[in-house]
Amino acid sequence: MATIRTTSRRPADPRVSVVIPLYNEEGSLRELHEQLVEVFSRMKSTYEIIFVDDGSTDGSYKLLKELNKKDTHVKVIQFRRNFGKSAGLSVAFKEVRGEFVVTMDADLQDDPHEIPGLIEQLGDSYDLVSGWKQKRFDPITKTIPSKFFNFVTGMLTGIPIHDFNCGLKAYRRDVVKTVHVYGELHRYIPALAHWAGFRVTEKVVQHHPRKYGHTKFGASRFLYGFLDLLTVLFTTRYIRRPLHLFGIWGLLALVLGLCVDGYLSVEWMLGRTSLSNRPLFLLGFLLIIVGVQFISIGLLGEMMSRHERDEDTYSIREVLK
């Protein structure tokens, strides 16, 4: 097992934990840190900032180490390579200690000054407040697919959120400790939280043009987003009881196949028909096989779900606390 280097200077448990996954955002990190310090100074609130360096190849990690040495509120987690945003959020969610958790992107397009309003809206009524970039400063090649994606996602999930993929969100700690994020499911956290019984709402937030670097958005992410949506719809409904999905269809196929072949077998025993020239008999036999296979898959899924393991899909090089 690889050794993880850890250095700790933790202050008392904070009220707010800010989680920032990043990849090659060297240009924006210092300014982002300054804005966060200013915001929490005005709030007069205790806080921690958890940066997750997702295998950056520029000078991001070097700069994060400097911030960590200068500011005891800053914690840094470095991945050995790029594992994706969901992995970054997942590892940070395990480390947060604040009563409230805020997630945001590191590119300065999310405004840190929105944090007080997001936390205030949580109040006593909500567990998750998702940002809504009503006025976006992104290229049309990103905004149009995003609007279509959000429309379809809202329609299929039934959750009235306009901007599922907005990185700026505020949570109660219970939410991030309950919702399991993996693969590319970070964009569906509001849906996962809603189906877990948490109260979800949204708030219009300010969005800024990108000042440094370039967007990581591509056509592949748009296509993978819909595949992930199918994953969410399946996992939230059937992952705990897969037999309910596969078993129903398997049972229908099995019963139909038995009825067809049973009827034809009776006809054959009475001498009314020959099975050699009846394609329907082969169809019934095929339905029986398919039914048994589906039920077997469902039962296997039941056993796997009872012994599922929470395996990390990332590898940490170093942790600076």
Image: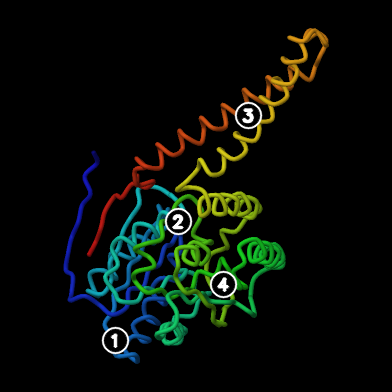
Distance (Cα) linking label 3 and label 1: 62 Å
Q: Residues within 10 Å of mark 4 (few under 14, many from 20)?
A: some
Work out whether mark 2 precedes mark 1 in sequence or the reverse, and give the earlier one: 1
Work out whether mark 2 precedes mark 4 in sequence or the reverse, and give the earlier one: 2
Amino acid type, label 1 = Ser
Comparing 72 with 31, the one in front is: 72
Front: mark 1 or 4: 1
Distance (Cα) linking label 4 and label 3: 57 Å
Work out whether mark 3 precedes mark 1 in sequence or the reverse, and give the earlier one: 1
Residue 86, labelled with which disc? Answer: 2
The residue that label 3 is drawn on is 254
Name the residue: 22% across, 69% down: 69
The residue that label 4 is drawn on is 210
Tag 2 and tag 1, C-beta contact below 8 Å: no
Tag 3 and tag 1, C-beta contact below 8 Å: no
Residue 242, labelled with which disc? Answer: none
The residue that label 1 is drawn on is 45
Work out whether mark 4 precedes mark 3 in sequence or the reverse, and give the earlier one: 4
Name the residue: 51% across, 50% down: 235
Q: Which quadrant of the rendered structure holds the N terminus? A: top left
Mark 1 lies on a secondary structure that is loop
Q: Position of residue 146 (x, y in %)?
A: 66, 65
